[in-house]
């Protein structure tokens, strides 16, 4: 197969990581992968190092039709058979280029944001007339697409995010060190520090957790637009000495080895890559029912599910895990990732779906 993937993620994120991992695995299997992404993005820097053809395009606007001739030229030059669009900034431009060139177009939905009013009606045109299929990264997103756009069940395939299990060995916590594991328990959030990630809710849950156990330290791993705001919030709650902001880190497997549990507080999420990485490391996750993890985590068995935007319930979930045999819970979470989310397994599903679409 010859696939062209469009992604407009400016910084490194779960979505960018998915494109990166899938592209590498597809290339390894002998498929041709070409990626169009933003200039100076994480993908534009890392994909060429893997020998994957990469073009940088900055549309400026979602409907910058002046970009379409260049996309048509690239599709013809690379003899592309299938176009996959992973970011809204390319939805219209790449799908129209696909229509003009007669190529199959598939749209990947990795976030659950639901449109209303006129935007919903406009997107109905996109789903009904410009694309040939949809990949949802969670069962939750598939259900919402069917509900919102009356799409047929067979037009949407669910292909989960994939985890390279070789990077996340199943082992117990390392010995404590002075930087990352200075207390008996470490609870971590690994996320972009953005408004829609539920991080304020997590920080507000910390005092409630400390009421039950003083011996917990907290890591916030990542960077973003509200980092200073979050630091100010920890200060106002007098918990600064309990919270370590690590900034952006590439050594996530090593960090997870020092962590006991992780929290995914986002009120709405497709399928959190960081949560899956935690589960792959046998670290159980406290997640909200607004995420696609609600279809993955068996509550109280392989993790904890709590209501979105409820700091007290979030705190109770964390305390419940810490007071239980959370290592056993983590082992169960690891088995789920091995069965459903290994990179090789999900890419095989992707290839089957893609080949069926091309040959249809």
Image (cartoon, grey):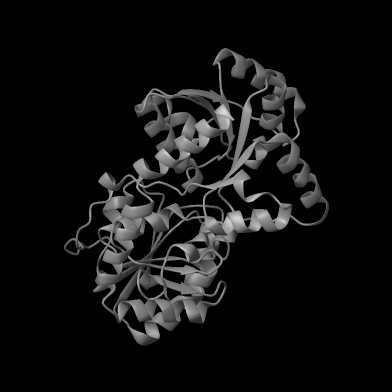
Res 45 → quadrant: top left
- Which residue is rendered at x = 37% and y = 49% of the image? 249
Image quarter of residue 106: top right
- Left or right: residue 287 versus residue 171 is right
Number of dots carrying numbers: 0
Q: Residue at x 39, y 32 (%)?
A: 24
Q: Is residue 195 left or right of residue 46?
A: right
- Residue 357 appears in the picture as rendered: yes
Residue 266 % position (x, y) = 53, 63
Identify the residue shown where x is 34% and y is 77%.
321
The front one of 312 and 120 is 120
Residue 58, picture quadrant = top right
As drawn, 54 above or below 227 = above
Taking the view exactly as shown, the residue that stands out farthest to the front is: 360
Residue 231 x %, y %? 48, 65
Q: Is residue 320 above or below residue 71?
A: below
Q: Is residue 36 visible?
A: no
Of residue 333 and residue 20, the one placed in the foreground of this image is: 333
Residue 271 pos. (x, y %): 49, 55
**Residue at 55%, 77% in the rendered image:** 310
- Foreground: 166 or 3? 3
Q: Quadrant of the C terminus?
A: top right
Residue 35 position in % (x across, y down): 52, 28
> Which residue ends up furthest to the bottom in the rendered image?
211
Q: Is 85 or 55 nearer to us in this picture?
A: 85
Q: Which residue is the extreme one toward the left?
A: 175
- Residue, far top: 77
């Amino acid at each position: 197969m010859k696939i062209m993937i469009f992604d407009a993620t400016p910084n490194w994120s779960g979505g960018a990581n998915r494109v990166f991992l899938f592209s590498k695995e597809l290339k390894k299997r002998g498929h041709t992968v070409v990626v169009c992404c933003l200039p100076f993005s994480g993908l534009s820097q890392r994909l060429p190092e893997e020998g994957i053809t990469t073009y940088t395009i900055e549309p400026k606007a979602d409907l910058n039709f002046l970009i379409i001739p260049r996309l048509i030229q690239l599709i013809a030059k690379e003899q592309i058979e299938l176009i996959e669009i992973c970011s809204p900034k390319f939805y219209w431009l790449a799908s129209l280029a696909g229509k003009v060139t007669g190529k199959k177009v598939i749209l990947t939905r990795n976030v659950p944001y639901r449109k209303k009013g006129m935007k919903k009606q406009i997107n109905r045109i996109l789903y009904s007339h410009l694309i040939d299929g949809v990949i949802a990264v969670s069962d939750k997103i598939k259900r919402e697409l069917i509900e919102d756009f009356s799409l047929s069940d067979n037009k949407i395939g669910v292909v989960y995010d994939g985890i390279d299990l070789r990077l996340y060995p199943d082992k117990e916590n390392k010995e404590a060190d002075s930087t990352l594991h200075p207390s008996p328990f470490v609870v971590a959030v690994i996320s972009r520090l953005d408004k829609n990630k539920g991080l304020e809710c997590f920080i507000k849950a910390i005092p409630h957790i400390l009421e039950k156990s003083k011996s917990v330290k907290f890591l916030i791993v990542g960077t973003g637009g509200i980092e200073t705001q979050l630091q100010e919030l920890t200060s106002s709650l007098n918990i600064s000495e309990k919270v370590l902001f690590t900034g952006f880190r590439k050594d996530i497997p090593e960090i997870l080895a020092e962590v006991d549990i992780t929290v995914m507080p986002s009120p709405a999420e497709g399928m959190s890559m960081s949560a899956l990485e935690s589960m792959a490391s046998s670290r159980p996750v406290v997640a909200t029912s607004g995420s696609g993890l609600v279809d993955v985590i068996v509550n109280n068995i392989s993790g904890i599910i709590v209501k979105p935007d409820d700091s007290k319930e979030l705190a109770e979930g964390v305390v419940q895990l810490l007071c239980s045999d959370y290592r056993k819970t983590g082992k169960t979470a690891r088995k789920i990732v091995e069965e459903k989310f290994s990179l090789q397994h999900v890419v095989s599903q992707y290839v089957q779906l893609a080949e069926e679409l091309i040959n249809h």
